[in-house]
Image (cartoon, helix red, strand yellow):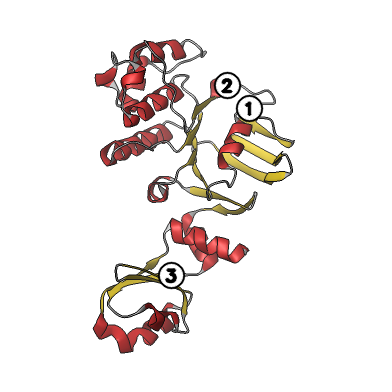
Amino acid sequence: MTTALEVKHINKKYKNKVVLNDINFSIQSGEIVALIGKNGAGKSTLINIITKLIQQDSGQSKIFEKEKFDRNLIGVMMQENISLDRITVKEIIKLIRTYYRNPMSYQAILALSELQNYTNHPMDKLSGGQKRKLQFALTLAGNPDLIFLDEPTVGMDAESRTKFWKHIDELKKQGKTFLITSHYLEELEKVANRFIFLHNQKIIFDGSLNEMGKQLKKVQVTFNSELIEDIFNKLPAVLRVSELNHHYTLITSDVNSLITQLVPYLSAIDNLEIRQQNLDTLMDSLIRNEE
């Protein structure tokens, strides 16, 4: 299998603040990898370094094992939308296609970005969601093999986000490789096969969601109850409690003991559910372990 991206010992400081500390990982062709972390973790900085928009202090990255950086191999969808006056969707897509050796066909770009009905719209008159679709279209213009998506679905409605991820799956089946950042963690859970978690300037986890759950060995128990939170905080098997509008989430590493401890309160509990933690709660658990 081809290595689509290799990152070795990347370091970056801004003045005296360390942003990235000895970052190492590789991504194989055809993977969908989520780069996750809290705001300020360095995700966008890392993508900017890999795509040569900014310079690292030390370390290196290679794309498809090539010594020389080749922009024709990559597509980058950044957080900020580009908007120009007096140019239409059709004109900007066709213009950007001319910058690449082997561009994707114009019709394929329109189909994947869902912009067939907006080709004559001026860029600056598009809605926020339509501008994100156009950014995606421009990202695909060069028919890249490695695609970076930084908060790709911000501003899209729910239907558009669902369609967007279906198109990502189509591209994956064609052999495209993705490195994605997004605050919509529930979307990443569905599409990514691997998660690289940045925290305190370094990688604290690299693996699948299932591997993350096994490493932490924690389960969440959810239910509705009018009982006060202190009752559940005092249970020996409970590691953490959160409550919102009488909906409780309890985190435990010993679910059997917890259920036994909940027995006296079952008459005041509804909709009891036991499940593995989601990505959001797993991230919090990893951070707590680090601290």
Q: CA distance from mark 1 to mark 2?
A: 9 Å
- The disc, 3 or 1, on the residue closer to the chain's N-terminal end is 1
Side of 162 relative to 146 (left or right): left
Percent coordinates x, y for residue 101 in the rendering:
52, 13
Quadrant location of the C terminus? bottom right
Which residue lies at the image location 30% right of the left edge and 40% below the top edge? Answer: 162
Q: Nearer the viewer, mark 1 or mark 2?
A: 1
Q: Secondary structure at mark 3?
A: strand
For label 3, the residue is 219
Which residue lies at the image location 46% right of the left edge and 22% below the top edge? Answer: 143
Q: Secondary structure at mark 2?
A: helix
Q: Secondary structure at mark 1?
A: loop
- The disc, 1 or 2, on the residue closer to the chain's N-terminal end is 1
For label 1, the residue is 52
Percent coordinates x, y for residue 35 in the rendering:
53, 45
Percent coordinates x, y for residue 91 in the rendering:
37, 10
Percent coordinates x, y for residue 44 in the rendering:
56, 38
Q: Amino acid at mark 1?
A: Lys
For label 2, the residue is 71
Viewer-proximal residue among 18 and 181: 18
Viewer-proximal residue among 278 and 284: 284
Q: Is residue 36 above or below residue 219?
A: above
Q: Are marks 1 and 2 in contact (CB under 8 Å)?
A: yes
Viewer-proximal residue among 202 and 86: 86
Examine the image and state in which quarter residue 112 appears: top left
Residue 156 can be seen in this image: yes
Q: Amino acid at mark 2?
A: Arg
Which residue lies at the image location 50% right of the left edge and 58% below the top edge? Answer: 283
